[in-house]
Amino acid sequence: MRAATMTQSRSPGLRRRGIALVALLLAVFISATHVWMNSFGNVSTLFQNGFHFAGFVLLCVLVSPVADADWAKLRGVRVLDIAFGAAVAAAALYVVNAETAIYDRGVRLIWSDWLAGLLCIAGALEFTRRTTGWIIPVLIALALSYVVWWGQYVPGVFRFAGLSAETVLFRALYGDDAMFGTIARISSTYVFMFILFGAFLLKSGAGEFIVNISRAVAGRMTGGPGFVAVLASGLTGTISGSAVANTASTGVITIPLMKRAGFPKAFAGGVEAAASTGGQLMPPIMGAGAFVMASFTQIPYTTIVAVSVLPAILYFLTVGFFVRIEAKRSHATALANEDGPTLWQTFRDGGPSFIIPVALLITLLVRGYTPTYAAGYAILACVVASWLTPNRMGPGRIIEALELGARNMIMTAVLLCAVGLIVNVITTAGIGNTFSLMIASWSQGNLLLALVLIAIASLVLGMGLPVTAAYIVLGTLSAPALYQLILQGQLVDLLAAGQLPETAKAIFMLAVPEKLAALSAPMSFADAREIVTALPFESLSLLYGQAFDPTVLALALLSAHMIIFWLSQDSNVTPPVCLAAFTGAAIAGSPPMRTGFAAWKVAKGLYLVPLLFAYTPFLSGNWLEMLTIFFFAGFGLWAVAAGIEGYWENRMNVVERIMALAVGGLLLWPTTLPVSFAALAAFAVLFAWNVRKRAPGDADQAGVSA
């Protein structure tokens, strides 16, 4: 009797260990197979995407069960759950192999096609619910039912006559915008390989190196732990595209250091969340959204990475300015000399494991190799470089890295396959074009108002969607309108300068012939804007193709998507739903909402830097233009941070705060060089005045001045 009882008590534990072993083997198999398919294999895109979804569905059902409580009571539920996951995976593989037969039948589905297709959609709904919550499954259900049923009852511009269920199911599975289409291909290739690369870097000791090098470089400054958080999160962002994972991995070290130095708890958690959010903006690994952007815009990933360097640095500078201000206000101390290894020890023990793989990755990307090829060799370099450090990667650590990469990919893989169902409906029903026309109408051609509308939409979407999904949905809906408005501003500049090409004037002759005579000479910006506004919206697309060369058009499209990509990051730090900030709050032991508002304040660069994308050649200019914008914008962001906080090196009164905000605005706003230098001179005067008004109570009492 006693033996039977002991056997029953051990049984749940044995089952859990058995499932954990199966999950480990499956994760290693998935990772190894993806590396083979992306580096050496010659399989169809549809097969790779189907295998990708099937593998991660199986892994998801093992590591994220529908019920994980008492085995004795829920054993049957667990078995059915695993059986459901296996059925969905088998259905995905069936769909992959059924394509030719479906076309041979004239795109007619038989009962097995229906069963497999519905199982795939049901799996996308359920496993997305487990990994991201209810919002995306609800959106998928609404989208699919819209094109089948209730779209015909919607009044106005969003009315849709509807498609047959058979057509909707076929389009949901096959095609560029389908569940196993372009977005799934991005997930199974670029995104997976870079997430696996990040896992290998972490297992090779690069994560520890990043924190140690940050402590060695920035820890001795006033409020050094805050700068350590910014620098460590920025460097971690070069190998990790997840803000929450970044917060959790670096925050366990940096947040306690910040609290010990004298920073308020909520501020410490907020700084780590804001800095970690910048990880998705920092090249060379910018999160899944950057690869989706490359697919949407047909602009090489290397170009996106290259133009993202200076904006990412600006963002981290903004976070650093807030840290500096709070350090002076809170009298935060520097790290003690005994806290952490020296700079030489850090480079000796961990430098090769980070520098060599990342340098190889960047070199291969610059030389024109594909991101998957570059990531494959960078993964190999992680293993080789680790043998130059004490953290050598043997078979055990390689297996751990393969498992970590697959586990870190579960949510992204399931999400990106599932979100294809939403994108498919948006393109099929023409919702994207309709939404873009509405933005253009509501904004009345005003780019700033359009940016505000898109920022609000991003904030609302970010309350329920992960960052990547928010970018995909918002980019599909609003990027065309934003692209048109950016080009409209550039067209106004051309008209004002009297530089409109002759081929473009023919369109004016057809649309607004009474304005043709005025196009041959320079004019005021007001007159140019009036002429452009008089053009019918349908004529503008034709005009842009004649007025601008393809490079200008591509860079305008990149600017539109980059604005949306940056704005979509705010869901990590904007209450009421801000997962990165909540993660930081849990580590700091501070109230989640207060930490969220602190993160939102510190992450103001997410809203200010995109203005530079819209109104300046920050992404499209030559390097001299971009560096000039970067130089003035850096001082502008510092002044804005001081104006928001009411503190610089010392306290600021209301007049000083208004002046700082005004000077910051001038430094950020596109204008002439003389005006920018005058604003910089005003910045210097304001800063010097604030330093000289030091009061006895405001003296920096601890630490080494930065």
Image: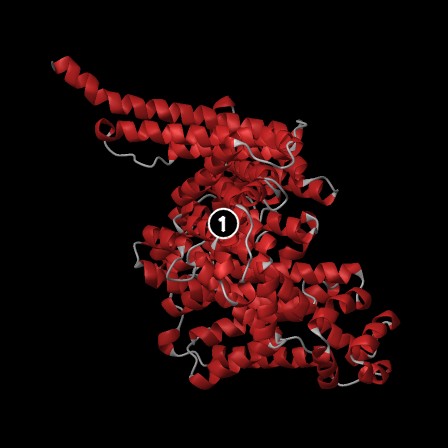
Q: Report whether residue 684 is seen.
A: no
Q: Which residue is mark 1?
A: 144
Residue 460 left/right relative to 183: left
- Describe the colour scheme in one phrase: secondary structure
Residue 23's place in the image compared with 512, above or below, is: above
Give the amino acid at mark 1: Leu
Q: Nearer the viewer, residue 694 or 436?
A: 436
Residue at image coords 32%, 58%: 592
Q: Is residue 575 visible?
A: yes
Tell me where residue 332 appears, x and y as whole percent: 38, 62
**In the drawing, does residue 284 fall left or right of residue 573?**
right
Q: Is residue 58 above or below residue 163?
A: above
Q: State the residue at coordinates (57%, 52%).
A: 282
Q: How many marks?
A: 1
Residue 569, image x and y in percent?
50, 57
In this rendering, the answer to whether 575 lies above or below 661 is above
Where, by quadrant of the figure, is residue 17 drawn? top left
Residue 190 image-quadrant placement: top right
Disc 1 is placed on an element classified as: helix
Residue 518, position as x, y percentages in the image: 83, 84
